[in-house]
Amino acid sequence: MSGTYIFFNLLGGVALLLFSLTLVKESVLKAFGGKIRRSLGRAVFSRWRAFGVGLGVTCLLQSSTATALLASSLANQGLATASGLAILLGADVGTTLVAKVLTFDLSWLQPLFLITGIIVMSFNKKEKHRPIGAIGVGLGLMLLALNIIVSTSEPMRDSLAIQSVMTALNDEPLFSLLLRWQARE
């Protein structure tokens, strides 16, 4: 494979991944946004409940940042500090769990999510069920994007250039930290 082919396949896979993550997040908020906000509001009564809500919301939204923003909007309304921290801790654990689940081979779920999502979106007359179908399509596209990225990056494992860059980053933790910080921005 040529370098140009690999580059554009990786770029396409990343673009599809970002699109699918946005689709899932927006669809979850459209389908369950009110319930999520009410759950976060009730989380102030127990630290364990706050932890569970933070974990669950992050798994649904696939974004601990979105959960933190929701929790901070509740903090402006008088959310207890301990409950807010428990929500954020749950969000961090949720992010870790989602990352761990995505390391498994879930390629068999991709067509299942896509087909189910398309059926729900196409044949359901009620507008309130369409976001649920969009969640399925988004999850299927996310798994497809991860498949594209993994299969395209396979030849890069043997590349001496990539190995030397990774070794250099391993030897320079401050530079690695700066790259990570820049990528997050």
Image (cartoon, rainbow, N blue to C red):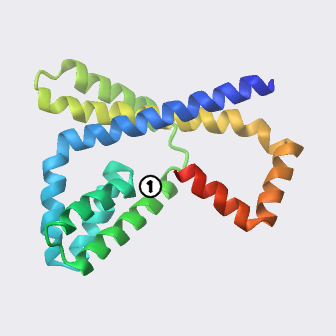
> Horizontal and vertical percent for residue 4?
75, 24
The quarter of the image holding the N terminus is top right
In this picture, is 14 found above or below 69?
Answer: above
Disc 1 target residue: 98
Q: Residue at x 16, y 74 (%)?
A: 44
Q: How many marks?
A: 1
> Horizontal and vertical percent for residue 76?
18, 66
> In the rendered image, which quarter is residue 91 located in?
bottom left
Say what amino acid the circle numbered 1 marks. Answer: Val
Describe the element under mark 1 as helix, strand or loop: helix
Q: Residue at x 60, y 32 (%)?
A: 148
Viewer-side residue, 164 vs 141: 164
Viewer-side residue, 179 vs 24: 179
> Horizontal and vertical percent for residue 180?
61, 56
Q: Residue at x 78, y 36 (%)?
A: 155
Specify whether 69 is left or right of 177. left
> Horizontal and vertical percent for residue 132?
24, 35
> In the rendered image, which quarter is residue 23 located in?
top left
> In the rendered image, which quarter is residue 49 located in?
bottom left
* Farthest right residue in view: 160
Specify whether 136 is left or right of 128. right
Q: Residue at x 39, y 62 (%)?
A: 94
